[in-house]
Amino acid sequence: MKSQIVFIFLTLCGASLCQGQGCENVIGDASCNAYKSLGYCTYEGVENLCYKTCNPVECDDTPCLNLPTISSNGYNEPNSTFYFAGPPVAYVCNAGYILEGPDTNTCLLNDTWTNGAPTCVPACPPLPVDSALYIPSSGPYREGDIVEYRCVNQTAAVVGNPFSTCVENNTVLSWSLETLPTCDTSGFCGPPPMIAVDGLNPESRDYASGSVATYQCRERRVLEGSSSTSCINGSWTEPAPICYQDCVDFQDCTNNVNFNYCTHPIYLSQMEELCRKSCGLCSNCTSPPTGDDVIAAPSGPFMQGSRVNYTCANGTLFGADSNLCLPDDVWLNESPVCYADCPDLPTIANGGNLPNGTTHSHGTTVQYSCDDGYMLFPPTENTCNDGNWSESSAGECRKICEALPQLHEHLVATTSPPFYLAGDSLNFTCSNGTLEGSATVTCSASGNWSTFPTCRADCENLPTVVANGGQSQNETTASHGTIVHYFCDEGYQIISPTFNLCNDGNWTEIFPAACVKICDTIPMLDELLVAIGNDSVLIQGQTVGFVCKNGTLDGPSTLTCSANGTWEYEGSGMGSGFMGSGMGSGSGSGMGSDDVFPTCIAECGPPPIDGSLILTNAALPEFVEGAMVEYGCRFGMTSDPTTSVCQSNAEWSLADLPLCSP
């Protein structure tokens, strides 16, 4: 029937309702009201049309052009080049797209449209489904929409993430939830705990995990406790509260009404408190329970509904901080306990504690910590227990040692922990060579290491003495620091080096010592002879030169120590041969004989003479050693010696000249 009315309406409204002379009352008020009752005049445009039809006014028959159209992925119905006022035009999206914006548009009488064009946006793919789950909302869905999965069995709990979002990934829409949640019935709670008296309890049945049950009290009753409890993993989180009659604000209890009067139904419902009070139904409580050092205030008397607060005379309160007087001289809670505070917390060096401070209340656990660069060792915490600390001393903060330096390639530590602390020691060995320095290094309290050792390489191929000697060890390999001494056979003199030192794989001397022959000491045959270079020890290759203090050298001017330990010469004597040697000039050697050594032929000056004497044989060209002169008297005779000889000391033998007498 509705579609038929719409057809008639569109037929009437689609015709030229205005004949150019003004609006005619094409349909009556009754018909117009009928359309309105069906809801057709609630849309903009149609309502105007009804108004126009039912209320003649001046109007325009001009149709609407340029319908705002969907740019892509959609179309409109009907599809025409012009539209008359009244009938709506519907917008439709292609499959896989969702309309975003108005779903219709209506031509108004003034040749305008009620809406702009909508758009068609991609729709999200179908949601993954499970027979145990359902989604309260219905699609289609667009990018950014979030859906929630719920259990078909409403007493079951959803396990896992119940939310999934439509997201775009590389221009393709998909749902973010990769794994669907499941439904669990194992977390059910039985009926919640119930209020014993005067309560309005929740329904007594099984509840799913996550459910919340609420409590209320009967009118003119006070609720003490939690007004709700939750079902979590099969258990209720809160006990049932209590509902009690508060008598504190009533008038003093007097038996001023008859009990039967009080129990009359009319008065029980309208003046219950007064009746209970007057009939002695409100009770008082004795003093509230209090433990050691527990103070309850205010003081009594304590009427039903009275509340006291607890404090500690010393220490910290543990338990309920208040109490309530209930009917029949019953207090709601037990007395709390006062525990003593703990002073003088053991403190830690190079660290601190949280909470801060040195005095803390019972039950407080203090956590120790260390400054940067330190490591904490137990105890790491301390707990206050009624005035006493659980630990008599704090933990220890030990300095973390600096990183090990670059070690010698052959230096090996016996242990290799990830880090080292103050007081730790390391022992070292060498994989090759000899350890130099202490084998143990220690980390100091400041985190610094003592001096590290190093590895010194062994030495190989010791340079050895070739002949006429040897060395203090026969092995050619030695460890770092080894000193090898060279020596020579008897009769030979060592030439540097006298020793060789192994220094980290290298010998300090690349050549060994040499042993050379020692020559005999040069005899000093003549007191006038001077030997130049005549050392205490004369060795092969050494040369000694000779000169005379006075006189002429007889023999070679130099002698050289030969390899066999004898003296050899090369030179000449005095030109006519060695005086007294019988050897000619040239070179030669004295093999184990003193003949090779030169001597000095002394030269005396002219003999002394005075005017009374004459020399009878003074015609010699030179006055050399052995030359003799004869003295004679010029006048008279002498009895003194008259002969004087040139001695080897270049002195004349006649010390005094002879005396002549007439």
Image (spheres, rainbow, N blue to C red):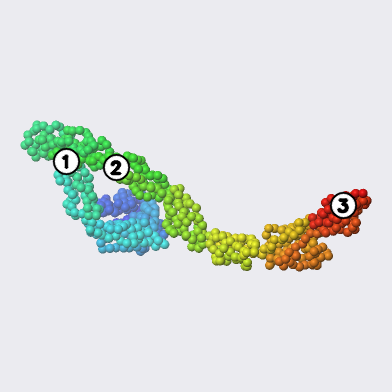
Earlier in the chain: of badge 3 and badge 2, it is 2
**Front tag of 1 and 3:** 3
> Which residue is at 80% across, 64% downward?
580
Marks 3 and 2 sit apart, C-alpha to C-alpha, by 139 Å
Left or right of residue 243: residue 358? right
Amino acid on which disc 2 is placed: Asn
Between 541 and 8, the residue placed more toward the observer is 541
Residue 76 in picture, x, y percent from top left: 37, 60
Residue 97 in picture, x, y percent from top left: 36, 61
Whether residue 73 is visible here, answered yes or no, is no
Q: Which residue is mark 1?
A: 244
Q: Secondary structure at mark 2?
A: strand
Amino acid on which disc 1 is placed: Tyr
Relative to 296, is 595 above or below?
below
Between 447 and 156, the residue placed more toward the observer is 447
Answer whether labels 3 and 2 touch (C-beta < 8 Å).
no
Residue 441 in picture, x, y percent from top left: 46, 54
Left or right of residue 560: residue 411? left
Residue 557 in picture, x, y percent from top left: 77, 61
> Which residue is at 21% across, 44% downward?
225
Earlier in the chain: of badge 1 and badge 2, it is 1
**Front tag of 3 and 2:** 3
Residue 388 has which mark?
2
Amino acid on which disc 3 is placed: Ser
Between 573 and 293, the residue placed more toward the observer is 573
Q: Secondary structure at mark 1?
A: strand
Between 43 and 141, the residue placed more toward the observer is 141
Residue 639 has which mark?
3
> Which residue is at 75% across, 65% downward?
595
Left or right of residue 482: residue 654? right
